[in-house]
Amino acid sequence: MNAPAYNFAYLDEQTKRMIRRAILKAIAIPGYQVPFASREMPMPYGWGTGGVQVTAAILGPADVLKVIDQGSDDTTNAISIRKFFAKTAGVATTTATDDATVIQTRHRIPETALHANQVLVYQVPIPEPLRFLEPRETETRRMHALAEYGLMHVKLYEDIARFGHIATAYAYPVKVNARYVMDPSPTPKFDNPKMDDCPALQLFGAGREKRIYAIPPYTKVVSLDFEDHPFEPYRFNAPCALCAAENSYLDEIVTDDKGSRMFVCSDTDYCESRQAAGHHGSLSAAPYKEKAGSHG
Amino acid sequence: MADPDMRENDEPLLVATSLSKSFGRIAACRDVSFALYPGEVLAIVGESGSGKSTLLQLLSGQLAASGGHVSYRMRDGVARDLATLGEAERRFLFRTDWGFVHQDPAQGLRMAVSAGANVGERLMAVGWNHYGRIRDTASDWLTRVEIDVARIDDAPRTYSGGMRQRLQIARNLVTEPRLVFMDEPTGGLDVSVQARLLDLLRSLVAELHLAVIIVTHDLAVARLLSHRVMVMKGGRVIETGLTDQVLDDPREPYTQLLVSSILPP
């Protein structure tokens, strides 16, 4: 429960107000990077300091929190952040996407469709989509202000010239509400279509870079592309080895040093709930195989 | 010749009226006035520190003038004062109707992206969204500036100095600007490469009916390219006139000195 030394959800109330103001502004201007006075958090930069601050600012006692890291609920990062808020805010936590009201995520959007009344909080390492094209921040801010996004297409052009197709596989730039070009954080481009017209509120927090941006519910989000090289989501061409899902994003897991590999859903909650519902793949663990066998 | 065309050419493209610029107590540019017509090449010559580059920056709207103004006739035929343009308009002008060729190609090019993307950037900036067409146009322009199309995917940092300069020219001309500013475009190139570049520039200028303002300290460049010459000294224009007139029959003592300082061929 609440450790007495901390305010609810770790941050003090003034800080949370400051962050909420930034969030409100971000929602009012979809895709625009709002600067905020990012605080030091008890974790290193790169571990989700931005996402944690956003979550801390929006969390209420009645919220149910889910934290995922690369789709998984049980990696160090996800477990630590979940425990952090269980301890400092005393909120209920869950791994089920449907039950959560706040989902903090690193690098994935859950496979289960999000619904209204949910907030998806992204951890963002580099909020500026033009960063590696134009090193000057003064210049990139001006380019956003004037909607000069030709340079973004230069990057895609380079991809096609070099690889024959748009090889950007993650952090694939999108245009939000037909105005701002935005970096969707390093989610695979497979997830890009899920951001479009999403019923849930999407918030992005970059702690080191001190920026917050947002996609309000039901906002148009378009992945940039060329007419003759349209955007295509990428997925390994295989079913999940555990739940046989054909439409989920897969992780490639190397299983020995002789080149064997298996493909499994990166969203562990999705995979587990499918297995519990009786789906099983080529490499399912024994209990599920038996269960399936005893049923059929 | 068509009538509207004639009328177009009768009106100046760019008019500078008593332009001046001072940096503190130093007057870099004093009371410069002239008019530039479509298709005309104007050379600004003078020694280092005479205010040539400052003048070029004033004319291209990169520096705010301390006095006087510059007006430019837009594509719709309306002359506008550069100082009244918004930043968005000015930047749009810069990537459509204007070109700027820097002395150092690294300033005008993106050294880390391929030549094709360098040429295509302006097209993408004005909304071209078809990879095939952008690439075709880029290849076409590389050919026009005598760069081997096989090198379209190489970054300019793998190019020689002369090739970089030609690439910079292609990148600027791809949107078919009407006015190109050039700041010592042949500086730092060896003589044979210079000659080839000047030859190329001369044919492009004639072919595209470009107006050019070229800053140079090299009178040979002025003689080869320009129709008119302005000689600057200490921030003032001390002599102006047709190129052959100024270079063959200089009136001012300083111009005489400048002309006589060239080694006879």
Image (tube, rainbow, N blue to C red):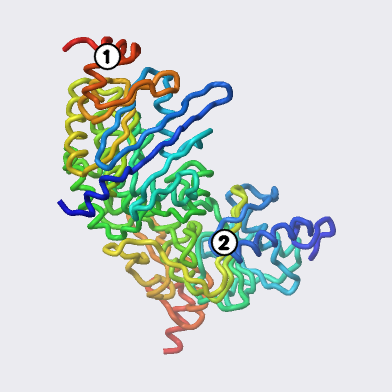
Q: Nearer the viewer, residue A1 or A158?
A: A158
Q: Residues within 10 Å of mark 1 (few under 14, many from 20)?
A: some
Q: Which mark is residue A122?
A: 2
Identity of the residue furthest to the right in this view: A4
Indicate the position of residue B32 as horizontal and vertical percent values.
Answer: 42, 29
Indicate the position of residue A158 as horizontal and vertical percent values.
Answer: 31, 49
Indicate the position of residue A122 as horizontal and vertical percent values.
Answer: 57, 61
Q: Nearer the viewer, mark 1 or mark 2?
A: 1
Subunit that carries the residue with mark 1: B
Subunit that carries the residue with mark 2: A
Indicate the position of residue B1 as horizontal and vertical percent values.
Answer: 15, 51
Side (left or right) of A251 relative to A15: left
Identified by mark 1, the residue type is Val
Label 1, secondary structure: give it. helix
Q: Which mark is residue B259?
A: 1
Name which residue lies at 58% across and 68% down: A120
Name which residue lies at 26% across and 63% down: A228
Name which residue lies at 44% across and 66% down: A192
Q: Residues within 10 Å of mark 2 (few under 14, many from 20)?
A: many
Mark 1–mark 2 distance (CA, rounded to whole Å): 67 Å
Label 2, secondary structure: give it. strand
Side (left or right) of A33 relative to B106: right
Quarter placement of the N terminus of chain A: bottom right
The answer, for residue A104, to whether it is visible in the render is no
Q: Do the CB atoms of the residues marked 1 and 2 lie less than 8 Å apart? A: no
Quadrant of residue B148 in the image? top left
Quadrant of residue A193 in the image? bottom left
